[in-house]
Amino acid sequence: MAASLERVDDVAPLLEEAGEGAGVTEGLSLSSVHLEGVRAPGVPLAFTELSASRVEHCMFQGCDLSKSWFVDVAFEDCDFSNCLFEDANFTRCSFTSCKLIGADLSDARLMRTRVAECALNLASFVRAKLEDCVIQASDLTGADLSYGAQKRTAFWDCTLEGISFFRMGLSGMDLSSCRLGALTISDSMEELKGCRMDLIQAAGIAKRLGVIIVDA
């Protein structure tokens, strides 16, 4: 499939085409392209539409990609640290070995999306909606998923230290392969209803409730 994609290594000409000369860089629309080695830190790219494409070895640190649409896009070894993805849509996308440290995905929607071996430290998914997603072997230390919603979403072998699941229901989710610690949840702990944990994880939650576990 990659051979049929048009290779792009510089977005500046595309931005000029979209009206950068007039100070308008929003609304970039691309399909069937292979973005490789692009360096565009801090570029305003809100309302971008990208489909049926690959994005590899690119650096978009601090870019505004809010309200953007991504459909059938594979991201690999890219740096989206501190990017703004507020109200963005991801459908049938994949992130592999990417950095999204401090990225803001508030109110974003991720559907049938896979995240593997990525750094999502301090990322914000506040009010985000995740459906049919898989997040594996990734670091979400300090991430915020408060008020989020999920359906058929799985976390596998992830680091979830200091993560906030406040008011996000985890029913049906298996966290037994993950490293948990200092979770932020409501006092009633209703977020954990219906999720799966191993014995050590459950003991940590029990301790929070004041339950004393006796080794028989």
Image (cartoon, rainbow, N blue to C red):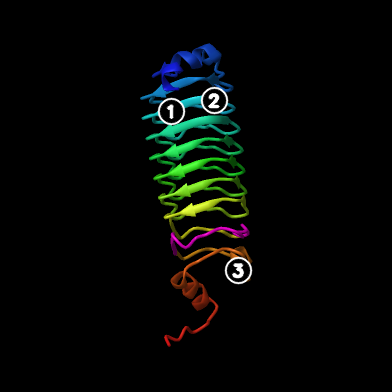
> In the rendered image, which quarter contains the N terminus?
top left
Q: CA distance from mark 3 to mark 2?
A: 39 Å
Looking at the rendering, which quadrant does residue 194 occupy?
A: bottom right
Task: Please report the bounds of the magenta region as a residue range.
Answer: 167-180
Residue 67 seen from this side: yes
From the viewer's perspective, is residue 158 above or below residue 5? below
Closer to viewer: mark 1 or mark 3: 1
Name which residue type carries label 1: Val
* Residue at the image position 55 percent from the left and 78 percent from the top: 209
Q: Is residue 68 magenta?
A: no
Circles 1 and 2 in contact, beta carbons < 8 Å: yes
96 vs 143, nearest the viewer: 96
147 vs 91, nearest the viewer: 91
**Residue under circle 2?**
50
Name which residue type carries label 3: Met
**Residue under circle 1?**
55
> In the rendered image, which quarter contains the C terminus?
bottom left
Circles 3 and 2 in contact, beta carbons < 8 Å: no
Looking at the rendering, which quadrant does residue 189 occupy?
A: bottom right
Circles 1 and 3 in contact, beta carbons < 8 Å: no
Q: Secondary structure at mark 2?
A: strand
Name which residue type carries label 2: Leu
Q: Residues within 10 Å of mark 2 (few under 14, many from 20)?
A: many
2 vs 90, nearest the viewer: 2
Q: CA distance from mark 1 to mark 2?
A: 10 Å
Q: Residues within 10 Å of mark 3 (few under 14, many from 20)?
A: some
Q: Is residue 178 magenta?
A: yes
